[in-house]
Amino acid sequence: MPVGFWRRCAYLHRDHFKAKAQTDHMSLATIATSEKLLAWYDVHHRELPWRMPPRDIAKGMLPDPYHVWLSEVMLQQTTVEAVKPYFRKFLDTWPTVTALAAADREDVMKAWAGLGYYSRARNLKACADTVAALPEARFPASEAGLRALPGIGAYTSAAIAAIAFNEPAAVVDGNIERVISRLFRIDTPLPEAKPEIKLRVEEIMPRSRPGDFAQAMMDLGATICTPRRPRCMLCPLRDDCEALSKGDPEFYPVKPTKSDKPTRSGAAFVAVRPDGAILLRKRVDKGLLGGMTEVPTSAWTARIDGIDTVEAAPFPAAWQKAGVIEHVFTHFRLQLTVFRAEVPDRAPEPGSFWSREILTEALPTVMKKVIESALPGSTKRLK
DNA sequence: CAAGCGTGGTT
DNA sequence: TAACCAAGCTT
């Protein structure tokens, strides 16, 4: 290939960037960075059930805002692999936001059971109800409009606006905080560094492809610019990364150390009726496991040697110790001593109910552990 | 604004 | 094993 060919290519390349800088109001350097990222994304993007690939975005298509919203709420502090089956189940059961608004709240909680952070499920339903009542039952098409809805905060509103509505919103999640703090070697610890990170994102964000750019940054953070042992040799931004040039990308972002979790303990009671039904009750609609279903338990004390005896039982019965389960929540560890009793049919106390459909109840994982320890096999779906 | 809020996977 | 982490929001 003649030398002139390559010179011409380089020239056209620069010309292309100059044109982009004009239309996107960006500097040449930041254009170069974001163009490298988008070129990488075009080839290496992840295929995800809720995602419209860049080739279709390029044709002018946009993903369904309902799909984007549902996936974004599910993905809050939750891994992609954990979300996939829930996303499919929700879409199968409630194909539109109108369908979700028409659903029973209890059915939504049951479908969310196991995914964690249950305020998300309560807010999801409240948000669906709100959107369904809007003209034409459409999601607001702006970041500000979305931000006002329950369960939609700074990140999610920007993400939906950029991905589903092509609005040039600055999307900042945990991945992007990591990528940006390394790229610009930001020594300010989180969360203090958030405003600076957002400014940097606004700087390098190409106005032409806001949704692809946000997802490209997240894919880069998830697959290349990982928290530990980042694969910098494969990174499309390796030549621009200040942390890499100094040799310490793994050091970023700077975060305060977390204090260790205390342990709480208590007792849980699995009452089994002759027909196999289990006595359950509903937790209040706020706080830990709010709105979810549980077996009767004692209070969970801050002591490891707390109330773990039959004295805390909801009613007298031949309670037998069935085991001890441990569970780790966000801010404490829980140790529950599990008691089981075969009991004759009895009227449940107010707020309690008998259930033979354990598999479909809104039982959080900790309660499935409790029941499983008392009645091995009862929470495992045969398949 | 710091604390509260789940769960499962990785190191 | 314990620590750390994952597409954060609410109060």
Image (tube, coloured by chain):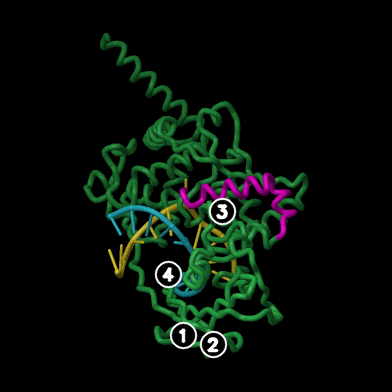
Chain colours: A green, B cyan, C yellow
Q: Which residue is mark 1?
A: A308
- Kindly indicate whether the residue at mark 2 contacts the one at mark 1 (C-beta within 8 angstroms): yes
In this picture, is A68 found above or below A351?
Answer: above
In this picture, is A10 found above or below A188?
Answer: above
A345, A286: nearer the viewer: A345
> What mark, if any, has residue A312 been given in the picture?
2
Question: Could you tell me which secondary element the residue under label 4 belongs to?
Answer: strand
Give amino acid for label 4. Answer: Val
Q: Residues within 10 Å of mark 4 (few under 14, many from 20)?
A: few
Q: CA distance from mark 2 to mark 4?
A: 22 Å
Question: Which segment is the magenta one?
Answer: A80-104
Q: CA distance from mark 3 to mark 1?
A: 37 Å
Q: Residues within 10 Å of mark 3 (few under 14, many from 20)?
A: some
Question: Could you tell me which secondary element the residue under label 2 belongs to?
Answer: helix
Mark 3 against mark 1, which lies toward the viewer?
A: 1
Q: Quadrant of the N terminus of chain A?
A: top left
Mark 1 against mark 4, which lies toward the viewer?
A: 1
- Kindly indicate whether the residue at mark 3 contacts the one at mark 2 (C-beta within 8 angstroms): no
Q: Which residue is mark 3?
A: A73
Is residue A31 visible in the rendered image? The answer is no
Q: Which residue is mark 4?
A: A328
- Kindly indicate whether the residue at mark 4 contacts the one at mark 2 (C-beta within 8 angstroms): no
Residue beneath the point at 69% across and 61% down: A105
Magenta span includes A27? no
Residue beneath the point at 38% across and 36% down: A33
Relative placement, left or right, of A304 versus A6 is right
